[in-house]
Image (tube, rainbow, N blue to C red):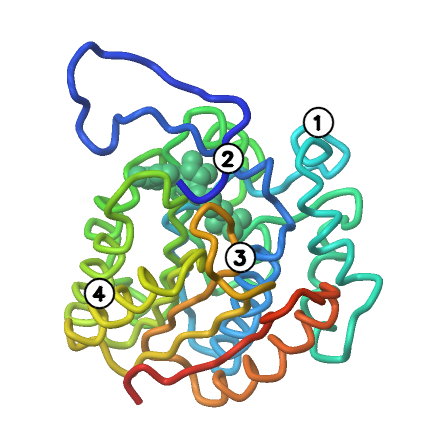
Amino acid sequence: MIMQNIEPWAHCTGQRPAPSTRPMNYRHAFHAGNHADCLKHSLLLSLLAALRRKPTPFAVLDTHAGCGIYDLAASEAARTGEAARGALRISANAGPANAPFLAALTQAGFPAFYPGSPALIHAALRPQDRLMAVELHPEDHARLKAHFRRDAQVAVHKRDAWEALRALTPFPEKRGLVLIDPPFEQEGDYGRITEAMALLRHRFRAAIIAAWYPVKHRAPVRGFHHALMEAGIAPLLAAELWLREPTDPQRLNGSGLVVANPPQGFAEEAGEILPALLAGLGADEAGAGSAVTWLKP
Ligand SMILES: C[S@@+](CC[C@H](N)C(=O)[O-])C[C@H]1O[C@@H](n2cnc3c(N)ncnc32)[C@H](O)[C@@H]1O
């Protein structure tokens, strides 16, 4: 588990549950607007901007969507203070490369609220585009459903992300983005991402596929990158930001986004966004840094 869960939500069946019915403790409300969200959402906006450059319709599948929008005055955000050290800090120290990110936040009601990935994607859709948002947690799904009620451009699904990935791709639009953002609460999420990206690269070549991952310690990240390359996923790049040397496996020292089939110019744009984020976060611990690396050009 990458982050501590403060209010466990659990049920017990008396038997070892199947993957999709295991207790889900992770609640993104405690973490919304943290440094990992800032990295993921800044890069997500860059990918969406690239999709908008062509007039033909696109679709987005957000496999782990969360609630949609988060109240930063709510007790969850206050208890962790992660948004205060993340998006709120960046908004006070923003550089030009952070401008699209901050504009999208402001449009969604920041600093009172912080938009999650489905809200950011929804704001980037044109009339011809659509969003499929998948969330399995009953409460978060109910909030997400309420957020997009009566919105014909958004389909909200309460189903397992890994099953939905297979069922909802390829898109009839023949282009778009799949965002994979598991909580890394269960063992095996690196493997599930690798499998999903390999499958999507095979059956839906035009899709951009982006997957978030934690950077706590270097060894598991190296193993993950190696597995993606071994699976033949190309072109593939990794964009990472870390607040300190990632040597403590108990801390979320940083995070990254692997992007398969990235749009032209994305690597260069990410190369400007990440140092600006790092500066905005005021990362002053030894070993802080960022990198954009082609794993397979
Ligand atoms: C990191 S949060 C998502 C944050 C969101 N993508 C954003 O950027 O705003 C991960 C979400 O995945 C949900 N989740 C966990 N396992 C899932 C599964 N197997 N299928 C669908 N959703 C799942 C969790 O309930 C949680 O809301």
Q: Is residue 198 left or right of residue 89?
A: left
Instruction: State which mark lies toward you, 3 or 1.
Output: 3
Circle 1 residues within 10 Å: few <14, some 14–19, many ≥20 = few
Sequence-first tag of 2 and 3: 2
Res 75 label = 1
Sequence-first tag of 4 and 3: 4
Q: Secondary structure at mark 1?
A: helix
Please tell me in which quadrant of the rendered image residue 262 appears: bottom left
Sequence-first tag of 3 and 1: 1
Q: Measured from the top left, where is residue 233 in percent x and y?
A: 22, 75
Residue sitting at 26 percent across and 26 percent down? 21
Alpha-carbon distance for marks 1 and 4?
38 Å
Q: Is residue 154 visible?
A: no
Residue sitting at 28 percent across and 62 percent down? 171
Alpha-carbon distance for marks 2 and 3?
14 Å
Q: Secondary structure at mark 2?
A: loop
Q: Is residue 64 left or right of residue 95?
A: left
Circle 3 residues within 10 Å: few <14, some 14–19, many ≥20 = many
| Residue at the spot of label 4 | 200
Please tell me in which quadrant of the rendered image residue 148 appears: top right
Sequence-first tag of 2 and 1: 2
Residue sitting at 52 percent across and 76 percent down? 52
Query: Tag 3: residue type?
Result: Asn
Q: Is residue 197 visible?
A: yes
